[in-house]
Image (cartoon, rainbow, N blue to C red):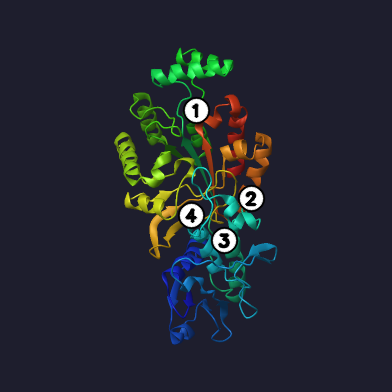
């Protein structure tokens, strides 16, 4: 256990110290504002305040963790032995930056509360973020800083028994379209035929015809393949099921279709299943609740995990809605157009609500990459993607973090624009668990 002395114990101080020390470095932490208690303590201890008490392990504090609300802060990026960092702490500090304040700024998504320009889907964009502007979006700097702190603590307190956390991998699969052609109603099937003919997409006409007449299997129906890989490689896999009503942005088969309901029931038996709330749930709490109840009626189990469709969420409103519905895990923390670490960490963390200044029970699982980002936004080949995946995995492995990937069942189809991507998924799994 490490004792932390600070002049004021705020919810922000408790939150970020427990995240860095306890959840990341596996060091229990206790706080005090009493100098005599701090001096009498014989184990590892540090002071987090403006001036040191003596010759102890001292980190000069930034004001951020002692404030309330959101202000426009100055973040002057500098290098800490080749690693970008900010909130300099001066020469008396045991480390040159206040990594607790900097980590809080990034993990709380402080910058997403500030005025910013949204994209066409109402999303916060990577180009607005400090991580992208400063060139560290593809590095989990919060975890890197924590391990640099750990090295200093080991120098100062060599007799303390430090624990090592282990690297984890989670494969997540979004089901936007369970089937490419099957189980759609007559209007959608007929309309699809006409649209393909009008656009002279003759190959699509043939595929649709062959699947509807059971001449060939629906190309998006890859679930047994994914489950086989899960079982063979022994990896944690989570499916996020879209069960919203049909809209321009939600084009899955109807949740009333027995084949889709049976598919979901089958997935629940072999893997974890979460909700994939539809496009318009971001600003519609009633719709979100309706879809959660709809999925629970299919699975006959409480739904505790969620990932927003199109990764559309507003902070803190969307997360507050999830908490109200007793969702325990959110997996939306990432960007659609860029790979990397939106919250600059590869460690799952509890959402801190800056509106109410509290740590919430909602645990956020940040993913590192998405298939559509690689194919549609970055427009790189499966072979090029493999290099990017390996680089991100190495960053996570270096800090024993949690490497989370986001693929869709359709990207494993080898169908049309996804030709060659099924093999990439299998290669990615080998890299992720090696």
The residue that mark 3 highlights is 142
The residue that mark 1 highlights is 222
Reading the chain from its start, which is encountered first: label 3 or label 1?
A: 3
- Callout 4: few (<14), some (14-19), or many (20+) C-alpha neighbours within 10 Å? many
The residue that mark 4 highlights is 348
Residue 329 coordinates in the image, percent (x, y) = 41, 50
State how far apart marks 2 and 1 are (Cα). 28 Å
- Callout 2: few (<14), some (14-19), or many (20+) C-alpha neighbours within 10 Å? some
State how far apart marks 2 and 4 are (Cα). 18 Å
State how far apart marks 2 and 3 are (Cα). 15 Å
State how far apart marks 4 and 1 are (Cα). 28 Å
**Callout 4 secondary element:** loop
State how far apart marks 4 and 3 are (Cα). 12 Å
Residue 432 coordinates in the image, percent (x, y) = 59, 44
Reading the chain from its start, which is encountered first: label 2 or label 1?
A: 1
Reading the chain from its start, which is encountered first: label 4 or label 3?
A: 3
């Amino acid at each position: 256990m490490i004792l932390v002395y600070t002049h004021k114990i705020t919810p922000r101080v408790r939150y970020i110290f427990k995240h860095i020390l306890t959840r990341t470095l596996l060091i229990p932490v206790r706080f005090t504002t009493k100098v005599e208690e701090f001096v009498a303590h014989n184990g590892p201890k540090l002071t987090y305040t403006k001036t040191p008490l003596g010759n102890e392990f001292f980190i000069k504090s930034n004001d951020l963790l002692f404030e309330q609300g959101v202000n426009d802060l100055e973040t002057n990026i500098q290098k800490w032995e080749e690693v970008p960092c900010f909130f300099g702490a001066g020469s008396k500090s045991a480390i040159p930056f206040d990594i607790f304040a900097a980590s809080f700024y990034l993990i709380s998504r402080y910058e997403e509360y500030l005025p910013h320009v949204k994209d066409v889907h109402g999303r916060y964009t990577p180009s607005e973020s400090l991580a992208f502007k400063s060139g560290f979006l593809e590095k989990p700097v919060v975890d890197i800083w924590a391990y640099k702190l750990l090295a200093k603590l080991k120098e100062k307190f060599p007799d303390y028994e430090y624990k090592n956390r282990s690297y984890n991998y989670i494969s997540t699969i979004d089901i936007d379209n369970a089937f490419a052609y099957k189980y759609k109603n007559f209007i959608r099937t007929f309309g699809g035929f006409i649209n393909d003919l009008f656009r002279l997409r003759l190959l699509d006409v043939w595929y649709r015809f062959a699947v509807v007449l059971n001449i060939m299997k629906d190309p998006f129906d890859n679930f047994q393949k994914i489950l086989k890989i899960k079982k063979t490689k022994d990896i944690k896999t989570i499916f996020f099921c879209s069960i919203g009503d049909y809209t321009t942005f939600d084009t899955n088969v109807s949740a009333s279709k027995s084949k889709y309901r049976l598919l979901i029931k089958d997935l629940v038996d072999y893997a974890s299943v979460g909700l994939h709330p539809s496009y318009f749930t971001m600003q519609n709490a009633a719709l979100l609740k309706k879809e959660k109840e709809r999925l629970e009626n299919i699975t006959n189990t409480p739904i505790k995990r969620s990932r927003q469709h199109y990764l559309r969420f507003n902070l803190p409103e969307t997360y507050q809605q999830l908490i109200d519905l007793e969702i325990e895990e959110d997996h939306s923390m990432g960007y659609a157009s860029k790979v990397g670490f939106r919250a600059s960490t590869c460690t799952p963390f509890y959402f801190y609500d800056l509106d109410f200044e509290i740590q919430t029970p909602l645990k956020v699982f940040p993913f590192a990459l998405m298939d559509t980002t690689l194919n549609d936004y970055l427009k790189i080949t499966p072979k090029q993607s493999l290099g990017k995946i390996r680089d991100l995995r190495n960053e996570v492995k270096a800090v024993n973090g949690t490497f989370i990937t986001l693929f869709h069942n359709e990207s494993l189809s080898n169908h049309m624009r996804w030709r060659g991507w099924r093999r990439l998924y299998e290669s990615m799994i080998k890299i992720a668990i090696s």
